[in-house]
Image: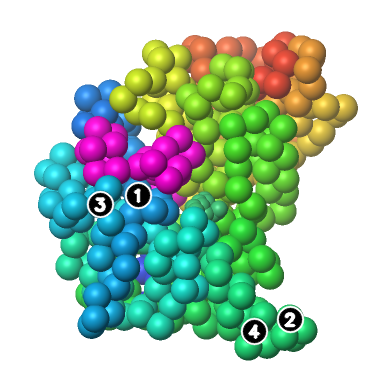
């Protein structure tokens, strides 16, 4: 299906990721250690914790599942994943979907077998196994680009686009709907061409890690990308670190709130089998998830900044607006939201999405103390 959007072609079916994908990915917590049992445990936990019912549907295996190819070139799984089809069946039996990882180069980032010159074959293997989502990571394809087009950046960029489009065509040819996640760290303004090569989402930055410094740098750095996102095609500021232990509760609430305002994919990256009640409550805040998943499909952006505080807003369906009042400083600060600045008259309904209670403006504004590295997240409606 080819649709026009903002001047560029949209090469994918927008019903496939009509709202930003939600689920879990193995990398942030398990990295190269992930195995079949971990993935089954994650699927079990998505169900028992209520996360599946809150919208977390995809169970995504990241790098290190791959073994060598056989004489016919067919990719095999390594000892950590004895039977991918059986694993996919298990995940599906829980009412979930399953994702996998590869890349256009000869090797993945972790040095495992990737899809270079085996794209159709790999797409077919994924479809045969019952895969629903592919993260396709540039990594060693950069070496191919440099070898084949030394010192020619334009040619290298074109090679990169062609490589992503090639796998998209291979996925389409399988006939199975497979969400296509581009991972090339935002190179060459991927948001401008990602949709035209079939991307349902594309990483807009280099890797996140479980620190306030990195998370906030990525999240607050997403300025100006809103116009490139919409149903079926999303900016991806990388996976969640909520619950991995490197940030405070306030910092993780900032992470979750900011990602929701950015209409980012919500891919939990923690060990779901052993999470605290606070982690679960952050990941399953239905009012915040509803902001991320709003049917209008608009990404938010920064509305104002005063000192180390920033207000980010996201238009929601029905004329409502989500407003994140963020404090990037290491001390608490009052933040004031003026209704007229976000398109409302003096009378609006305000709801605090973390306290789960209605709050009230006075004289057309709302002032609240926001904790260090924290957030107050509001829904403003008429
Ligand atoms: C890259 C990606 C990460 C992860 C690793 C796996 O760094 O950006 O998200 O997939 O590769 O090796």
Q: Residue at x 19, y 60 (%)?
A: 130
Residue 84 versus residue 240 in the image, above or below: below
Q: Quadrant of residue 11?
A: bottom left
- Percent x, y of residue 198: 45, 72
Residue 124 versus residue 61 in the image, above or below: below
Q: Secondary structure at mark 3?
A: loop
Between discs 4 and 1, the one toward the N terminus: 1
Between discs 2 and 3, the one toward the N terminus: 3
Q: Secondary structure at mark 4?
A: helix
Point out the frontmost of discs 2 and 4. Answer: 4
Q: Which residue is mark 2?
A: 153
- Percent x, y of residue 30: 42, 38
Report the disc number at residue 166.
none
Residue 116 versus residue 37 in the image, above or below: below
Q: Is residue 157 left or right of residue 257?
A: right
Q: Which residue is mark 4?
A: 147
Report the disc number at residue 79.
3
Report if the CB atoms under discs 4 and 1 are less than 8 Å apart.
no
Start-end of magenta stretch: 15-43
Q: CA distance from mark 3 to mark 1?
A: 15 Å
Q: Residue at x 41, y 15 (%)?
A: 276
Report if the CB atoms under discs 3 and 4 are less than 8 Å apart.
no
Q: Which residue is mark 1?
A: 61
Q: Secondary structure at mark 1?
A: loop
Mark 2 residue's CB less than 8 Å from ligand 1: no
């Amino acid at each position: 299906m080819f649709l026009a959007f903002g001047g560029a072609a949209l090469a994918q079916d927008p019903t496939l990721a009509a709202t930003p994908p939600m689920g879990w990915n193995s990398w942030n917590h398990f990295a190269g250690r992930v195995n079949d049992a971990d993935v089954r445990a994650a699927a079990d936990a998505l169900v028992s914790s209520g996360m599946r019912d809150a919208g977390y549907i995809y169970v995504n295996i990241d790098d290190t599942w791959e073994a060598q190819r056989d004489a016919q070139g067919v990719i095999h799984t390594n000892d950590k994943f004895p039977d991918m089809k059986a694993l996919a069946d298990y995940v599906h039996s829980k009412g979930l979907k399953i994702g996998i990882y590869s890349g256009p180069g000869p090797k993945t980032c972790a040095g495992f077998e990737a899809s270079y010159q085996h794209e159709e074959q790999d797409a077919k293997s994924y479809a045969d196994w019952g895969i629903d989502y592919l993260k396709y990571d540039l990594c060693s394809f950069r070496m191919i680009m440099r070898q084949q087009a030394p010192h020619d950046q334009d040619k290298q960029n074109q090679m990169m686009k062609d490589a992503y489009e090639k796998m998209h065509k291979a996925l389409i040819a399988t006939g199975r709907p497979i969400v296509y996640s581009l991972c090339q760290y935002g190179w060459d303004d991927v948001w401008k061409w990602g949709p035209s090569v079939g991307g349902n989402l594309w990483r807009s930055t280099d890797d996140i890690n479980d620190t306030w410094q990195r998370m906030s740098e990525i999240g607050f750095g997403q300025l100006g990308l809103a116009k490139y996102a919409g149903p079926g095609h999303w900016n991806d500021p990388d996976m969640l670190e909520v619950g991995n232990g490197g940030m405070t509760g306030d910092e993780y609430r900032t992470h979750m709130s900011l990602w929701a305002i950015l209409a980012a994919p919500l891919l939990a990256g923690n060990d779901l089998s052993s999470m605290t009640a606070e982690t679960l409550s952050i990941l399953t805040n239905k009012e915040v998830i509803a902001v991320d998943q709003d049917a209008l499909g608009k990404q938010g952006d920064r509305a104002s900044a005063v000192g180390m505080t920033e207000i980010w807003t996201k238009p929601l369906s029905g004329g409502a607006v989500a407003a994140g009042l963020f404090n990037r400083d290491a001390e608490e600060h009052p933040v004031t939201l003026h209704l007229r600045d976000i398109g409302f008259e003096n009378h609006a309904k305000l709801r605090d999405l973390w306290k789960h209670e209605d709050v009230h403006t006075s004289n057309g504004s709302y002032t609240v103390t926001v904790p260090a590295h924290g957030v107050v997240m509001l829904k403003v409606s008429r």
